[in-house]
Image (cartoon, helix red, strand yellow):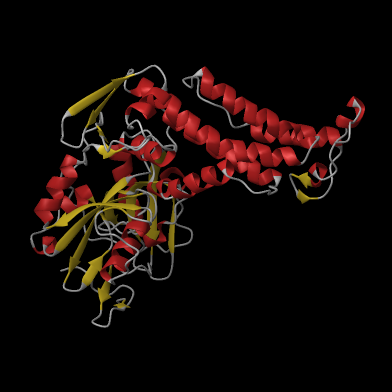
């Protein structure tokens, strides 16, 4: 080993100076140190996070900060992050159960473990030879007990079952998280770039904050929006800024509660044709009628969750229809209720529809019940009434909402796909009939 003088150890690493806010270039050492520290300085922890987890997180950020002097430290910081994810889950586990964890053994008998350290629980659920006893963990939530061996994959599954971690798209990243942790625990030499390490630290902060009560997906702020269209054009904006300039005087309008930056050109009152939650309020009618209704009713904006949404999908007569919000599905006519229904939890209606479409095509990579490898959780299927009852058990609002059959006519989004006998799918012509 070469013994360096202190002044030499304080010299910046030329490789670290090449990473700038504008891409690969070169910064002077002072600016590079400032940039990298400010980059990870924005990833802060909630005040609810305990000191043990907080210190490990700060150690990761400190290692990263010294990467300006030694480029290899970015790799060390990135590798430490997934290990701290596991520590955070362990630190959260026992306090969540106030020190006493309840299990069911292989015969269904209750077992409890009272401990002050997570390692005590880890040992208690194992025999003397280290093999797992096969106990199931009882949850505070209403879900059935889950298999629990105390390792990272089980801790992630536990955190999701208890509602501490949310989001179906985030859930499918749990397997890579376990793989990355195992790679770090049994590494080969590798070198990471500063942006990769910063991304790991950002994800670590997000997971820690969620474990202690901070939502990962901030609620979507919705405002009152007017959508207007004529034979050639569709336009939309917040109601107080809406202009009829792009459309003629005979245009049709509708009033919605939605995110103004969402693409509402595919809006459909009956089906979830756009990504974010959108609520029908009034229409169709003229622009003057829309403004008169707004002046009279004075509706306001709101905030709604965007993760782990519940959708109902209908399969009838070889047609798979787009997802519907539960209250809208609850308000359908008897004829529109026919067929087999699916209740799916997903972050996006497109995820739910694509999953069910692939499943009906016989794709063996998709599962019909529970968590899929894709970002959905299928809760059940059956007749309309059966699935609606299941949705109520999952705390969905099942109050029927009657909405008119209204969609922007220029939308190219079909309301259904038809399953052909050869396994392929056929799409209806845009604007064609789609609902019995």
Q: Position of residue 110 (x, y in %)?
A: 18, 27
263 vs 309, nearest the viewer? 309
Q: Quadrant of residue 15?
A: top right
Instruction: Specify the quadrant that holds the N terminus.
Output: top right
Between 54 and 37, which is closer to the camera in this rendering? 54
Instruction: Say above or below: 217 vs 380.
Output: above
Task: Tell me: 93 left or right of 283.
Answer: right
The residue at the point 27 percent across, 58 percent down is 323
Observer able to see residue 194: yes
Query: Which residue: 31% across, 56% down?
Result: 272
Q: Where on the picture, by quarter, is residue 257?
A: top left
Look at the image and tell me whether residue 212 can be seen: no
Residue that appears at 65% across and 30% down: 61
State which quarter of the image contains the C terminus: bottom left
**Nearer-the-camera pick, 29 or 235:** 29
Residue ranking furthest to the left: 334
Residue 392: % across, % down: 16, 42
Q: Residue at x 36, y 59 (%)?
A: 350
Q: Quadrant of residue 423?
A: bottom left
């Amino acid at each position: 080993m070469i013994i360096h003088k202190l002044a030499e150890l304080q010299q910046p690493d030329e490789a670290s100076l090449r990473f700038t806010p504008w891409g690969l270039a070169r910064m002077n050492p002072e600016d590079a140190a400032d940039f990298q520290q400010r980059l990870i300085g924005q990833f802060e922890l909630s005040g609810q996070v305990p000191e043990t987890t907080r210190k490990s997180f700060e150690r990761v950020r400190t290692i990263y900060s010294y990467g300006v002097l030694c480029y290899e430290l970015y790799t060390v910081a990135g590798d430490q992050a997934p290990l701290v994810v596991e520590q955070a889950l362990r630190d959260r586990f026992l306090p969540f159960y106030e020190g006493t964890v309840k299990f069911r053994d292989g015969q269904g008998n209750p077992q409890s473990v009272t401990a002050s350290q997570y390692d005590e629980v880890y040992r208690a659920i194992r025999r003397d030879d280290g093999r797992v006893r096969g106990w199931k963990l009882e949850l505070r939530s209403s879900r059935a007990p889950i298999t629990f061996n105390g390792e990272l994959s089980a801790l992630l599954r536990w955190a999701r079952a208890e509602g501490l971690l949310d989001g179906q798209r985030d859930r499918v990243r749990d397997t890579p998280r376990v793989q990355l942790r195992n790679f770090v625990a049994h590494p080969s030499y590798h070198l990471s770039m500063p942006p990769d390490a910063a991304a790991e630290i950002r994800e670590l902060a997000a997971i820690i904050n969620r474990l202690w009560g901070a939502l990962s997906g901030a609620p979507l702020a919705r405002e009152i929006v007017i959508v207007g269209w004529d034979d050639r054009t569709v336009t939309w904006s917040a109601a107080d800024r809406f202009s009829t300039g792009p459309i003629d005087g005979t245009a049709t309008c509708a009033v919605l509660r939605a995110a103004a930056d969402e693409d509402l050109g595919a809006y459909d009152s009956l089906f979830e044709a756009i990504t974010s939650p959108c609520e029908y309020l009034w229409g169709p009618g003229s622009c003057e009628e829309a403004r008169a209704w707004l002046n009279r009713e004075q509706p306001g904006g709101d905030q709604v969750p965007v993760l782990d949404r519940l959708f109902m999908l209908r399969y009838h007569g070889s047609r798979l229809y787009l997802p519907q919000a539960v209250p809208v599905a609850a308000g359908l006519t008897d004829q529109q209720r026919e067929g087999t229904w699916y209740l799916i939890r997903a972050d996006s209606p497109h995820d739910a529809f694509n999953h069910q479409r692939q499943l009906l095509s016989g794709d063996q990579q998709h599962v019909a019940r529970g968590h899929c490898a894709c970002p959905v959780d299928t809760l059940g299927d059956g007749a309309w009434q059966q699935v609606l009852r299941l949705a109520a058990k999952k705390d969905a609002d099942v109050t029927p909402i009657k909405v008119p059959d209204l969609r922007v006519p220029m939308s190219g989004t079909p309301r259904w796909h038809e399953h052909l006998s050869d396994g392929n799918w056929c799409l209806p012509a845009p604007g064609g009939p789609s609902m019995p």
